[in-house]
Amino acid sequence: MKHARVACFGSIHEAVADDGKLCLADGRIVDFDQVVWLPPLEVGTIFALGLNYLDHASEISVNLPEEPLLFLKGPNTLIGHGGFTRRPAGARMMHYECELAVVIGKKARAVKREDAYDYIAGYTIANDYAIRDYLENYYRPNLAVKNRDTLTPIGPWFVDKEAVKDPMNLKLYTYVNGERKQEGSTKDMLFDIPFLIEYLSSFMTLNENDVILTGTPKGTVNVVEGDEVVVEIEGIGKLKNTIVADSIFAR
């Protein structure tokens, strides 16, 4: 089942997909264009992964990591489907990153990889933009690269894990103004989902609604003000947003 969180009629609603429309928790049926899309769940800790696809690491000419390159993101970064992502004035290189987002379903500590899927609630899509101008180096992404406001659209759907037969064999695509720019598959991850859950839970507790962003394949290109970016993952959906200038936010 596909779940969403939306704003309409003056309040926030849980909703599910219903034959091309949304069925709100109170039973009302609404069209997609009648709502403001929110992140599909109230997210806990956000773990982001760098260089988790062989082709992307080769694309930016760095050595493959020997262990996951993980960093944290704040909730200020998240926006919903159809939202605006701000491009800092003077930035020379800002690019999208289509990523499968894994949602933890229950408290996880010292999980073995063979049991990892038991701790997953489901999946969604994230577009984890990066401002490369502010990168200290490829091994330690700093706050200014990945933690700016509005930098991570997520959604529109949260999809139950039972609806995703093989999360390690899903196609990923990114379109900029309707032109396909990125294509890959989750099968090409360096560190797969069970490994990541085992790795993280070996030294910290994961909690319900924590989210792991699993990295992006090659094909990342610069985007500018006015660009419409759509990221798509097979079986999960399409997530759209628009790049806007700092001036839209009055600074």
Image (cartoon, grey):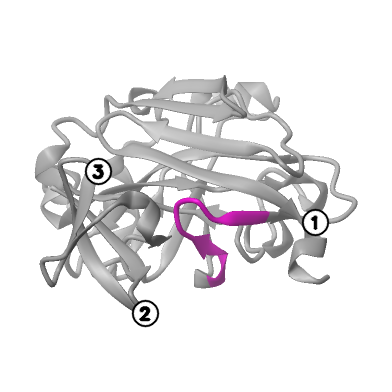
* For discs 2 and 1, the disc positioned in front in the rendered view: 2
For residue 191, side relative to residue 130 (left or right): left
Closer mark to the observer between disc 1 and disc 3: 1
Give neighbour class at mark 1: few <14, some 14-19, many 20+ (Cα, 10 Å).
some
Are the residues at dot 2 and dot 1 in contact (C-beta closer than 8 Å)? Answer: no
What is the CA distance from the residue labelled 1 to the residue labelled 3? 36 Å
**Dot label at residue 194:** 3
Q: Quadrant for residue 65, please give it.
A: top right
Residue 223 image offset from top left, x and y in percent:
72, 37
* Kind of residue at badge 3: Pro
Q: Residue at x 37, y 58 (%)?
A: 34
Residue drawn where x is 13% and y is 32% of the image: 165
Distance between mark 2 and mark 1 Cα atoms = 31 Å
Residue 78 shown in magenta: yes
Q: Quadrant of residue 224?
A: top right
Q: Is residue 208 above or below residue 53?
A: below
- Considering the numbered disc 2 on the image, is that residue within a helix, a strand or a loop? loop
- Magenta segment range? 76-85
Q: Is residue 12 above or below residue 6?
A: below
Residue 51 seen in this snapshot: no
Task: Give the amino acid type for the residue marked by disc 2 in the picture.
Answer: Gly
The answer to whether mark 1 and mark 3 are in CB contact below 8 A is no
Of residues 14 and 146, the one drawn nearer to the viewer in this rendering: 14
Q: Which residue is mark 2?
A: 10
